[in-house]
Image (cartoon, helix red, strand yellow):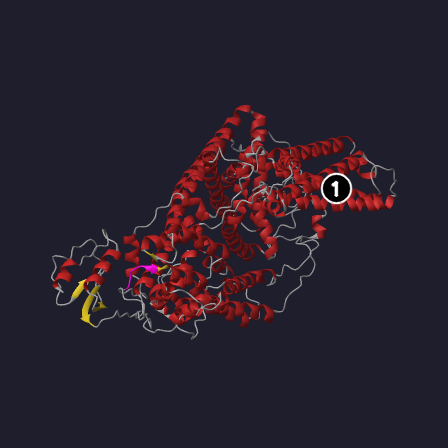
Amino acid sequence: MAENSDRSRLVLAEHSTDEVFQSISTSSSQEEIIPQPFSTQAVDIDTSSISFPGNVQVDAEGEVYTITRGGSLHMSGDQGSDRHTPWHYASQQSMGDFATTPSMEEYAQFIGLDSVASEQLAAMQETALIQSVVFIEDAYKYRSIHHKVDESCLRLYRHYQSTSVHVFRYVVIFVLHILAFFEPPSSLTWTSDIRFRGDRVQAPCWLLESIELMCLVLLLLDNVVRGFLLGKYYFVRHKWDLAAVILLVISIIDWGVSASLGCMEVVRFRRMLRPYFIIQNSSLMKKIVNCLRMTMPEVFSVLTMLCMHLYIFTLFGMLLFPIPQDSDVRKRNTTHPGKHPAGFQDDPGNVTEAPVSPIDAEGGQYFSSLLDSFMSLLVLLTTANNPDVTMPAYSRNRLFSIFFMLFLIIGLYCFWNMLTAVIYNQFRGYFLSSMQSSLVRRRLGVRAAFEVLRRKKGLFHHASSMAPISNDVGGFVIRAVLEKAMLPKTMKSSLIEAKQKVKQHPELMYSATDFQQLFTALDTEIAPPTEVGVRWFERPTLRRIQRVIVHKYFSYFGMGVALCNVVVITVELATEFAESFDDSTSDLRVVNFAFANYYVLEQLLKIWANGPRRYIHFKSNIFDAIITVALVIGELYSAIKFGIPFFYNRSDAGSITTLWNVLRIINILIMVRLLKIISFFRSMRVITSVLLDLVSNMKAFAGVLIVIYYVFAILGMELFRGVITFDNVTESNVTYECGSYRQLQYWSNNFDDFAATIMVLWDVMVVNNWMVFLEAYRAATSAWSYLYFVAWWLISVIIVLNLFTALIMENFIMKWDRHQIQQEAEAFHTPVTLNSVHDMFRGLLKEPADNELLMQLCLHQHLTLER
C-alpha cells in the first residue's frame, strides 16, 4: 500500500485521469476503493513525497480513496445513486419514464446482442446511464449541468425541459402580455383617431383578473419547480430566476390591490414587470441584455462627448442668432408664452404676425431659449428638421450654413459612427466570451456524461469476463445513450456517422478523447445536404440531351429568358399601361402566355433529365416549380374566362376588373421568378445568406425590442393618456402653423390605449417628424415630457438598433471571409447555409482543457464521481 500511495499523484495539469485510474486498477485488483472528502483546490501538487496514512491513495481529481479488502468496486452517488434500478429501454416518447424493466444484461440478450455488447451493458449502473442521457441533452441545448442528478429529479427534469412544457410556458407568457390590449383602456376600436374612435369594447374585469392571476401562478409554479431541480445552492446564485420569484410575488400583491379596487386603480405597476419573464426564459436574450449592460460604460463616454458637442453648439447658436430687444419675435414670445417652435398652441387663436427678418426668425423659432436651442440641435442631429432649422439664417447670410455643416459633420458623421463602432466592438467582445462560455458548458456536459459512464459501474458478473473493468466506455453503451436521448433525428444520424469515423469498430471502447471527438458532431447544427447523382440514360442520343439539360448553362439560358420577359413587361407598362390591362388580346397578355409555356416546358425537361429525387434536391428547382404552377393556374383561368390571347375576344365592362387583377398577379409572379438570378452571383448569394441568417437570428433581438416597446408603452400610457383632446367646435375655427401636430392631423398618434402607444413609439423610433410629437406633448404637459421621448430615442435607436447593426456586420464579415476562402468552389451548386449566433463565433472559440472541465466537475454540488 505504501508503494501505491507513493505512486499516486495529483496530476490534473499534466496527466489524464485514464492513466491514474489505470495504475490504481492494476495495483489493487483485489481491493475496494471508497472515496473520502478531500480538497480539490490544489493543482499540480506532487503527492509522491507526502506520506499518506495506512491505505490512502489520491486520484487524478484530488479525491482521496481508502484501500480496503473486499474484491469489488463500490460506489455511492448523489441522493440515491446507489440504487440499482434497471435501465428502461423505452421509446423516445416515454420522456424518461424509467419504470421497472428487465435488467441490462437480460435486455441485451433479449434483443440478440453479442457477448461484447452484453458485457458492456451488464457492467453499467443504470443511474449512471440516466445521468449521461441528461448530460448529453444539456450539452446539445447549451444548458448548465449544475442541477440535481438523482433518478427521481432527473425524470422530473426531463419533463420540465421537454418541448411541450417549453411551448406551454411561452403560451402562458404570451397570454399574460397580450392582456395589455384588452385591459382598460381597451384597444378594441376600429381606429385610434380621437375624432372618430367611439366607445371602446371593454372586457369584464373579473375575466381579465382571473386570466392574469392564473398566468402569474403558473409562472410562479414554474420557477418553484426550477428552484427545486437546481437546488438551493445553485438557485440563489441564478440572479435571473431569483429576481423572477421576487417580481412574481410583487405582481401577485399588486393584483390583489387591483382586484380589491375593481380594476379602477390609477397605476398598475405589475404591467411594467411582465416583459422580464420574456427575457428570463431566453438564454440568448439574456446574453443580449448583458451585452447592453457591459456596453453602457463605453457608450456613456461617447454620449457624454456628444452631449458636450450639443451643449457647445447650443451656446454658439444662441450667440449667433439672438433675439433683439425690440424685435417682434421677443414681443410675441412674451405675449403668447404658450406658442412653441412646432406651432402647437395652448390657447388656440388666430394670430396675425408681422413680417420679421430671417435672422430674427431663426433666433425666435429655434434658439429662443437654452432648452429650445438644445432640442432643435438634437433633432437636427437626426436630420428630422433639416434643412428647416437652417433656412431662416441661411436666407439672411450664406455663411451661417458653415455653423450647421460643422455641427452635422462632427456630431452625425464622427460621433455617430464612433458610437456604432464602440457598440460593435463591445458586442463582438462580449458575445465572443459568452459563446466561449456556451462552448464550455457543452464540452462540460459531454465530459460529465463520459465520467459517470466510466466511473459509476455496477458489479460486473458476466460469465465471459475475466479481465478487470476498463476505464473507458463501450460503444454499445454510447449507442444506448443516444437511443434514449431526446435529440433530433438528423443529430442522431450525425453522431452515428461520427462513431464510424472515430472508431473503425464502433463496438470497441472509447477513451475520453474519443468520446469528446464523437460528440463534436453536436456542433453541426445544420446537416449538410447529400449530393444526389444523375441517373444517365443508356441510349447515347438521350444521354447527350440529358447532359445539355443538367448543365448549368441550361439554367443560365432559362434565367436569360426570364430576364427578357421582365424587360418586355417593363416596356409594355411604360408605353401602353392602360391598354395592356383592358384588352384581352393585348401584347402583354400574348407575351406572358408564350413565356409561361416555355417555363412549363423547362421544368418538365428538368424533371425528365434529373429525375424526381435530384430535381427536388435543389431548392431553386422547388422555387421554380411553385412559381410555374401558379403561372399555369393563372393562365388557365385567364384562358377559360377571356379566351386564348392569340384570338380576338372583346371583354365586357364587367370583366375588365377581373382581367386586370389576373394580369397583375401573373406579372408579379414572373418578376418574383427573376429573384432566382441571385443564386448565380456569388456576392449576391453572400448578401442573401446574411439576410436569411438575420431572419433566423432575429428572434432574440426582436424579443429585446419587444420588451423595450412594452415597458415604454405602459409607461407612456400612464404619463400621457388623455392629454391630447379634440373639440370639434373650437378646432374648426382655428388655423395652425404648418407642420404642427394639429395641422398635420396626427390625431391617431396618441397614448390613449396600448395599440396606439405602440404606433407612436414606432413613429418616434423612425425619427422622421419626431419633433412634432416632442412639441405637441410639451405643449400639452410640460417640458419634462422631453425626457420620455429622448430616453426612448436613445435606447431604441442609439443602443438596440446599433446592436442589430453590429449583428449584421459580424454576420456579413464572417460570410464574406468564408466566401473568399471558397472562391474557387462552384457557386451554382453551393447551397446557402444558415448560421446561428453560435456558428458566427465558432471559428474564434478555444476548446477548454481537460483540467478545466475536471475541476468544474469536482465542484459540482450534486454529483459525486467515484471509481
Vertically, is 127 above or below 384?
below
Q: Is residue 338 visible?
A: no
Q: Is residue 639 magenta?
A: no
Residue name at image x 70 percent, y 58 percent: 198
Mark 1 crowd level (few <14, some 14–19, many ≥20, 10 Å Cα) = few
Q: Is residue 638 left or right of residue 513?
A: right
Mark 1, secondary structure of its residue: helix
Residue at 52 percent across and 24 percent down: it is 399
**Location of mark 1 (residue):** 664
Is 472 contained in the magenta span?
yes
Residue 763 image point, x, y percent: 59, 46
Q: Residue at x 49, y 52 (%)?
A: 700
Range of magenta residues = 469-473
Quadrant that contains the N terminus: bottom left
Type of the residue with mark 1: Arg
Foreground pick, 493 / 162: 493
Measuring from the top left, give residue 246's x and y in whole percent. 42, 65
Residue situated in front as seen by the camera: 244 or 609: 609
Percent coordinates x, y for residue 704 in the rendering: 49, 52
The prevailing secondary structure element of the residues shown in magenta is loop
Q: Quadrant of residue 234?
A: bottom left
Which quadrant of the figure has residue 385? top right
User: In the rendered view, would you say 859 is above or below 773?
Assistant: below
In this rendered view, identify the residue nearer to me: 166 or 365. 166
For this view, does 829 lie left or right of residue 238? right
Number of numbered callouts drawn: 1
Q: Quadrant of the C terminus?
A: bottom left
